[in-house]
Amino acid sequence: MTAASSLPVRPGMTVPLPGPLHSHREKLNELADLGYTDIWSAEADGADAFTPLAMAAAWEPRLRLGTAIVPAYTRAPACFAQSVASLADAAPGRFAIGIGSSSNVIVERWNGVPFVEPYKKVRDVVRFLRDALGGEKVTATYDTFEVKGFRLGIRPEHTPPILVAALREGMLRLAGREADGVIINWLSPADVTTVAGIVRDAADGEDREVVARIFVCPSENTEVVREAAKFAIAAYLNVPVYAAFHDWLGRGDALRPMWEAWQRGDRKGALAVIPDEVVDDLVVHGSPAACRARIQEYFDNGVTTSSLAILPLDPEVQYWEAVRSLSPSAG
């Protein structure tokens, strides 16, 4: 963690865990026993972001709960505020709401919602949630929607912090200026220095939580891991928002052959031209000790909270063995 931050280091894990949701109680207990402090859910094509956290709120009071992320587009404003207030009421003082633009694939292709003006949409949802969680009746015209006379009927004991998922500079500055923190994704420890610095600058010296989803596979079967990781990298980094992000970070030359092959419809060719160096930058792999050291680099460069996502890249690696070998109690 950077010297400029007084926030505690929070080792977290991505949820939902493997298996049906109803089976997770003992595993959530084990996460807390191992020293994990947080769990962070997402919302794409699996479980919604709130249900796994609601179950954890009842089952394991030691864990802090966060969403990383809920798309700003896929819930109407009042419904969004109700979901946030409900979970904050269920887990007082230990819930953080992370929101972001998501992507054109999830928002437009899957949910049929136009993916337009993502910066303004996220900014407006942040502002509306601030207004609604303050308890007053909200009648306001934001740039991307209007609310007429809505008042939350539930008042959480603790107002949850709001975090913004950010890639490039505009959204990073929004996170620093108007939110309580930032959520970052698909980047190297060295990249953290760049993005966390922008958030800190926009925050005018105030602390901001920096949550990073970190993709990990504790395996020394390097070639197997690299080849499998290229499928995940291709799936994400050909999405326009992530392609623009990595071009901005300086990986444009390294990734351009992949982007060009993908645009031609040559999926196999696209995978073949992903450099090993890019895989090693974006996916933590190696022995458990090497992985823990690499994860520490994220904290050293400005991350305050991790959300480890264990990737099944090596069939010899068992999920729970990986969880235990990467935990704060390991080593």
Image (tube, helix red, strand yellow):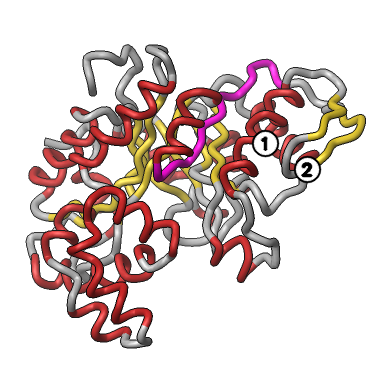
Residues at marks 2 and 1 touching, judged by CB atoms closer than 8 Å:
yes
Residue at the (40%, 45%) spot, across then down: 167
Q: Residues within 10 Å of mark 1 (few under 14, many from 20)?
A: many
Q: At which x and y percent is residue 35?
A: 30, 30
Residue 247 or residue 96, whichever sits in front: 247
- Where is residue 312? Give x, y as percent: 28, 65
User: Looking at the rendering, in which quadrant would you find the N terminus?
Assistant: top left
| SS category of the residue bearing label 1 | helix
Q: Name the amino acid, label 2.
A: Phe
Q: CA distance from mark 2 to mark 1?
A: 8 Å
Provide residue 289's location: percent of width, then percent of height. Answer: 9, 43
Prevailing secondary structure class for the magenta stretch in the rendered image = loop
Residue at 30 percent of width and 77 percent of height: 260
Relative side of 23 to 280, left or right:
right
Q: Is residue 163 above or below residue 241?
A: above
Residue positioned 32% across, 84% down in the render: 267
Residue 283 location (% of width, % of height): 22, 55
Q: Horizontal placement of 168 versus 275: left or right?
A: right
Of the image marks 2 and 1, the number of the one nearer the N terminus:
1
Q: Amino acid at mark 1?
A: Asp
How many marks can you see?
Answer: 2
Dot 2 crowding, Cα within 10 Å, few <14, some 14–19, many 20+: few
Residue 167's place in the image compared with 271, above or below, is above
Q: Point out the stretch of residues depicted in magenta.
A: 156-168
Where residue 145 is drawn, which disc sits there? 2
Q: Nearer the viewer, residue 191 or 151?
A: 191
Any mark on residue 124, and which? 1
